[in-house]
Image (tube, rainbow, N blue to C red):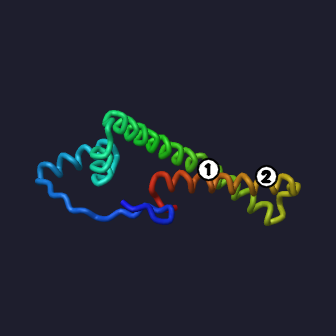
C-alpha cells in the first residue's frame, strides 16, 4: 500500500487457496458479516484476533439494529403524515404560522437525513 494525497492505494495480489481453504474462509467471513478479502486482511494483519472478531460481531449487531430502526421509521408513517400536512397547506385548507411551517420543513429534512444515513450504513442506495 502506498499513501498518496490522503488516499490509500491498494494493489491486487494473487493468493492461491484450495477449494476447502477458500470455503472455510468464506464461511468464517460470512459469520462475521465481512467480505472474504476483508476477513483475510484483518486476520493476517492483526495481533489480536479476538478483539477483531468482537468488533465484527458488534458491527453485525449494529447493522441489525439499524435495519430495525429503518423499518420502524418506515412503519411510523411519519413522512406520510408530514406529506399530508404539506398537501393541506398547499391546498390552502390548513393554515399554519410561518414558524410551524419552518419546523415542519426541518422535521422533514431531518427524517430524510436519518433515512439516508441508515440506508448508507446498510450499504443500500435509496
Residue under label 2, please give it: 103
Left or right: residue 100 versus residue 117 is right
Residues marked 1 and 2 touching at CB (< 8 Å): no
Q: Residues within 10 Å of mark 2 (few under 14, many from 20)?
A: few
| Disc 1: CA contacts within 10 A as few (<14), some (14-19) or many (>=20) | few
The residue that mark 1 highlights is 77
Q: Earlier in the sequence, mark 1 or mark 2?
A: 1
Q: Nearer the viewer, mark 1 or mark 2?
A: 2
Q: Position of residue 121 (x, y in %)?
A: 49, 52
Q: Quadrant of residue 91?
A: bottom right
Give the SS element for disc 2: helix
Please, is residue 56 above or below residue 113 in the view? above
Left or right of residue 117: residue 111: right
Q: Is disc 1 placed on a helix, strand or loop? A: loop
Q: Position of residue 36 (x, y in %)?
A: 28, 52
**Which residue appears at 43% of the width and 61% of the height?**
3
Q: Residue furthest right?
A: 97
Q: Quadrant of residue 89?
A: bottom right
Residue at x-position 17% and y-position 50%: 23
Amino acid at each position: 500500500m502506498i499513501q498518496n494525497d490522503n488516499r490509500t492505494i491498494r494493489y491486487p495480489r494473487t493468493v492461491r487457496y484450495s477449494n476447502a481453504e477458500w470455503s472455510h474462509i468464506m464461511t468464517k467471513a460470512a459469520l462475521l458479516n465481512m467480505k472474504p478479502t476483508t476477513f483475510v486482511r484483518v486476520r493476517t494483519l492483526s495481533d489480536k484476533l479476538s478483539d477483531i472478531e468482537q468488533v465484527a460481531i458488534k458491527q453485525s449487531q449494529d447493522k441489525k439494529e439499524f435495519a430495525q430502526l429503518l423499518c420502524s421509521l418506515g412503519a411510523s408513517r411519519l413522512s406520510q403524515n408530514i406529506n399530508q400536512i404539506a398537501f393541506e397547506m398547499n391546498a390552502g385548507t390548513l393554515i399554519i404560522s410561518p414558524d410551524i411551517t419552518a419546523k415542519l420543513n426541518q422535521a422533514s429534512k431531518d427524517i430524510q437525513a436519518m433515512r439516508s444515513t441508515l440506508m448508507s450504513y446498510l450499504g443500500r442506495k435509496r
